[in-house]
Image (cartoon, rainbow, N blue to C red):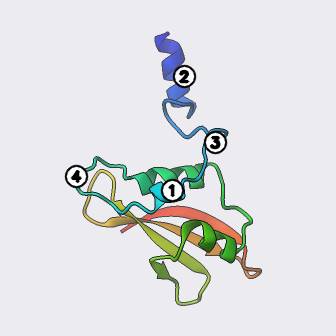
Amino acid sequence: MLLVCLCLSACGGPLGGVDCEEFRFDRERWGLGPDPKLDSPTPRQRIADALVECRSLEGRGRSEVLRMLRSPDGRSADGRADAWTLGPERGYGVDDESLEIRYGPEGRVRRVEIVQG
């Protein structure tokens, strides 16, 4: 039993990662702001982890991303990236983490990552 748990955890299974087949975006939970009384990760951080790991946004157009995630908290000067604040940086809590989405020249999602600081 212990060996199975260790393998599942190490392999990114239900104990160590996101179950992409079960993941469903929850707009209500995404809309919850960080609550200092809650443990890390915040609901937004958990959803962002799943969006990155499951590649849920790959190939989507910016307008579709905005309908899903609502207005970003920031936008790059070149207009090719949006960012949403997720909550305090995990482990350190000094700076915030953000979900950053970069778009290619055709306006479709090219890269999704969680950035710190």
Indicate which disc residue 111 carries.
none
Q: Residue furthest top?
A: 1
The amino acid at mark 3 is Cys
Residue identifier under label 4: 37
| SS category of the residue bearing label 3 | loop
Cα distance in 3D space between marks 2 and 1: 24 Å
Cα distance in 3D space between marks 3 and 4: 28 Å
Residue identifier under label 1: 48
- Category of crowding for the residue at label 1, using alpha-carbon neighbours closer than 10 angstroms: few (below 14), some (14–19), many (at least 20): many
Give the side of residue 90 with respect to residue 52, left or right: left
Q: Residue furthest right?
A: 106
Q: Nearer the viewer, mark 2 or mark 1?
A: 1
Q: Residue furthest front?
A: 28
Earlier along the polypeptide chain: callout 3 or callout 4? Answer: 3
The amino acid at mark 2 is Cys
Q: At 52% across and 29% down in the image, what residue appears?
A: 10
| SS category of the residue bearing label 4 | loop
Q: Nearer the viewer, mark 3 or mark 4?
A: 4
Cα distance in 3D space between marks 3 and 1: 12 Å
Residue identifier under label 3: 20
